Image (cartoon, coloured by chain):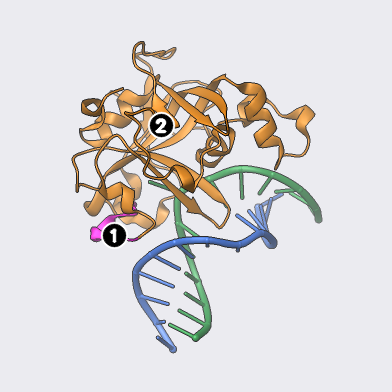
Chain colours: A orange, B green, C blue
Amino acid sequence: LHRPFFARDARSLAIDLIGRRLHSSTQGVNTAGVIVETEAYLGVIDRAAHTFGGRRTPRNASMWGPPGHAYVYFTYGLHHCVNIVAGSPGEPVAVLIRALEPVEGLDVMRRRRSVRLRRAGSLADTLLCSGPARLCEALGIDRSLDGVDLCGQGPLWIEAGGVDRPCAGSLRRGPRVGVGYAGAWAQEPLRFAASGNPHVSRPPPLQPLA
DNA sequence: TTCAAGATTTCCT
DNA sequence: GGAAATCTTGAAA
């Protein structure tokens, strides 16, 4: 997809990313999945965002850059999470990709995930990409992809064309995960998911989009 | 200079 | 249900 698609407010982008295919080409292998869960992070005003209050560090630098780029951060000392930068240049807002329904390169995903999940034989498909750090591991995404352009010929992109939305019209929303420290912002319904999709990261306290 | 907590996941009890 | 894995950041000392 092209730049204009990403150059808008994060909440709107988070909703329209559901049903789109995220592709990666890393380590010489292609993988892809349908985005089934996202969260919007609204920047300097959003206490849950890494850029709350105007915070600008080496880690979150790409969130301050132009839209349509990746913001990949490392957390808890061992996990990666990938965001898609939204808004306009200098407006540090982004959409966290929380879960995918795997559609391409499942064998590769299984292998990558099995490094940590030793019981390769019992690795269900719903464990491949059902969480922000899980999908990064499955797609081979790490800090080396931080800041890459999703609109060019890079290792990450969103497929143009059809919205593969098996849950069209049944999008759900609810509070974001793991942001209890964010006060009133923790309650904001900025998490979105395809209703009933088994690859969504956790049982949703989610409501219809309305 | 130290310390605690985090946009998480896995493994063990 | 709870702890461990251990990088990054901001606030306390």
Say what amino acid the circle numbered 2 marks.
Gly
Per the rendering, the mark at residue A134 is none
Label 1 sits on residue:
A56
Q: Residue at x 37, y 21 (%)?
A: A171
Q: Residue at x 67, y 29 (%)?
A: A110
Q: Position of residue A133 (x, y in %)?
A: 54, 42
Label 2 sits on residue:
A154
Residue A51 in the magenta stretch? The answer is yes
Could you classify mark 1 by the number of other residues whose Cα lies within 10 Å: few (under 14), some (14-19), or many (20 or more)?
A: some
Q: Which residues are magenta?
A: A48-57
Q: Chain of mark 2?
A: A
Residue A139 in the magenta stretch? The answer is no
Marks 2, 1 in one chain: yes
Is residue A130 visible to the viewer in this orientation of the structure? no
Marks 2/1: CA distance?
25 Å
Q: Position of residue A4 (x, y in %)?
A: 21, 27
Left or right: where A161 falls relative to A54: right
Q: Chain of mark 1?
A: A
